[in-house]
Image (cartoon, grey):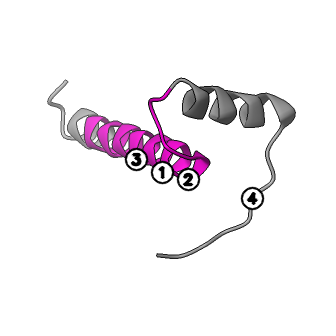
Amino acid sequence: MATRNISLTDELDRFIEDQVQSGLYQNASEVVRDALRVLAAQRAEQAARLARLRAGEE
């Protein structure tokens, strides 16, 4: 698994810490991976919607 160093705003850092403290995630990496999966799914849906619009389906 790849490792990356990222810079976060204080607000995002607190959000990640809150998610871990809530017990929903075991660590910050899980929060970030989940957030990226959600973002990837949203982008895929946007691309599919755009393709349907261009094809005249919507």
Q: Residue at x 44, y 43 (%)?
A: 34
Q: Which residues are magenta?
A: 23-49
User: Circle 1 — which element?
Assistant: helix
Give how far across and how far down residue 46 sits, in percent: 36, 37
User: Circle 4 — which element?
Assistant: loop
**Where 55 falls versus 23 (above or below)?**
below
Toward the viewer: 49 or 30? 30
Q: Residue at x 14, y 30 (%)?
A: 57
Kindly indicate whether the residue at mark 4 contacts the one at mark 3 (C-beta within 8 angstroms): no
User: Circle 3 — which element?
Assistant: helix
**How far apart are labels 1 and 4 at the CA level?**
13 Å
Q: Report which residue position mark 4 lands on.
A: 6
**Where 4 falls versus 34 (above or below)?**
below
Kindly indicate whether the residue at mark 1 contacts the one at mark 2 (C-beta within 8 angstroms): yes
User: Circle 2 — which element?
Assistant: helix
Give how far across and how far down residue 41 sits, in percent: 34, 42
Mark number, residue 33: 1
